[in-house]
Image (cartoon, helix red, strand yellow):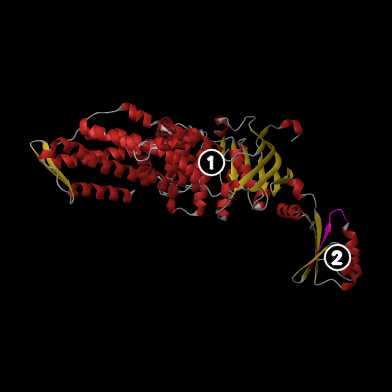
Amino acid sequence: MTAIYAAAAVLILVMIFAVHINAEGGAIKSVSIYGSKPLREADLPYIMPRFAEVYTSMYFFAALVLSVIATAQIIPEAINNRMFLLLISRPVSRRSIILAFFAGAAAAMTVVQLLFVISIFIILGVKTGVWFWYLLLSAFPLSAAFGSLYALMIYIGFLGKNTGIVTGLALGHVLFFSHLLASQNYNPAVIFGHTAGEILRTTACAVFPAIHELQVVTLGIIASGTVNPGAILFSLFPCVIYLWLSVRIFRKMDM
Amino acid sequence: MNHLSYTIEIELRHVTKVYGTGPFGRSHIRALADISIEIRRGELFALIGPNGAGKSTCMKIIAGTVHPTSGRIRVMNKSLNDLSVRGQIGYLPEQIPIPMHMTPQNFLYLMGRLCGMEKNMLSRRIGEVTELLHIDSWKNIPMKKFSRGMIQKIGLAQAVLHKPRILLLDEPSEGLDPGGRKDLRDFLSAYRSGGSTVLISSHLLSELELLADRVAVLNKGMNIKTGPVAEFTDAEKCIEIKVNGHVPKSIENELQSWSLTTDGDTTIIGIPASVHPGQVLELLASAGITPVSINRMKRSLEDAFINLIEGKSNR
């Protein structure tokens, strides 16, 4: 956990020093990221979305990556060091144990992510004089993204029983696969036809944690304060699937 | 105890356990092969056997942490799926997994709460148990500083914390010094006198001989023999005759039909209890040898166990 906090501190420092924001009169005049051409007043209608995009890309994925690294070892370690053995010898159902592991990690990471978002909110406010209140709402889709992802990590943890496998697959999904699923360049319609392609894409988005979609929701919140509750709820569907699968596999496991 | 006066507390009927190992579980290890055991209420029942005999697997199946491949298990005449049954079982696994960063107080509190104990009662009970096991002065120290024996005592504490009706102890003496083993014996004797049922597995057969009511010998997943301890130790009593020096070759051949061993300057002749020692004494007298001692020996549980496992008779 010390390494996680250190990494988070480094990221926050990067955001403080590498992103230059020029704000006047309560509005952002120009934004530049280290070495890039500044977006100026003429680009004003576009600054907020760009700014929101930059910040969601940075902090959204940073928060998820840190959360994955912090929680990947929980299930494999509980299996390998036989902590589950003591728990299941108690009068507690295996389903309750899984749900408790999920709720505990999700709650802990929600708190960490909320602190992360609040830190960024304060840094931006102090740095620019502009207080992005919508940023605080973005903690919700971030929590939903991690919740959905952690349910998948629990399932992978039971299958692989190895922290490296859980970490690799989870980060691979966050940083690559979820974008591939949502990318217009990857279009199953080309191979399977339009209807089948859309069915495949929708099924994949329902089965795999919708990280890209939730990032888009976060972007919308920051840019305009618009919340899409339907997208957030839909993103929890994979969470239910993987928790159910995890309970099924755990019920049959010998400790 | 006659056949009609006991209650079956734990019943295993034709239980088999096969573990899948290797990639995709293609290899199989048969840990238990069609074993049937009945454990009566209030008795201390011992499982003995060589390494890999299936003792721990048998315990884990009763504790509900391992699923049998086939067969039936009933505890208190109920299925193990009934959570109330698990609330009546206290389990000390072999090499208990303890979270080392926790203190005994916190760990026992967690274990007690998982058993549904109320906070006030739990605090009192933790004090009782830690005092009983002589670890009360270590209650608030992180367990990473504990010795192997103290960890084992913590394990025992978590098993008895909720006053279970059934206690499953897998190698409870492991890591305990002689004083600790005596404490354990006294503890188990007292615990059992309260009417609880104890199932224990151990390699320290001398300890089990003092404690157990009945014993089951397992080997390669099979139940070789089950019965009272006396049935193992009294079966082949023998008579031991000691003489100074070596016996002459003239009578050595005749004595070889029984057991003839040398211990330094002493020759020991072991004959079955069914044989009258007079024959041997006459033989010795004809060679001018006077025995130093004649003793009726009781076979130890260890001797009986070795005989059963190796399948050869001993003296």
Quadrant in which the N terminus of chain B is drawn: top right
Q: What residue type is labelled 2?
A: Gln
| Element marked by disc 1 | helix
The magenta stretch spans residue B188: no
**Disc 1 versus disc 2: distance between alpha carbons?**
52 Å
Q: What secondary structure do most residues of the magenta stretch adopt?
A: strand
Q: In this view, does B27 lie above or below A131?
A: below
Q: Which amino acid does label 1 sit on?
A: Ala
Which region is colored magenta? B267-275
Query: Which residue occupies 40% across, 39% down?
Result: A150
Residue position for label 1 = B159
Query: Which residue occupies 21% across, 46% down?
Result: A15
In screen coordinates, is A33 left or right of A169? Answer: left
Which of the 4 image quarters holds residue B65?
top right
The magenta stretch spans residue B271: yes
Q: Position of residue B237 (x, y in %)?
A: 80, 53
Q: Position of residue A229 (x, y in %)?
A: 31, 27
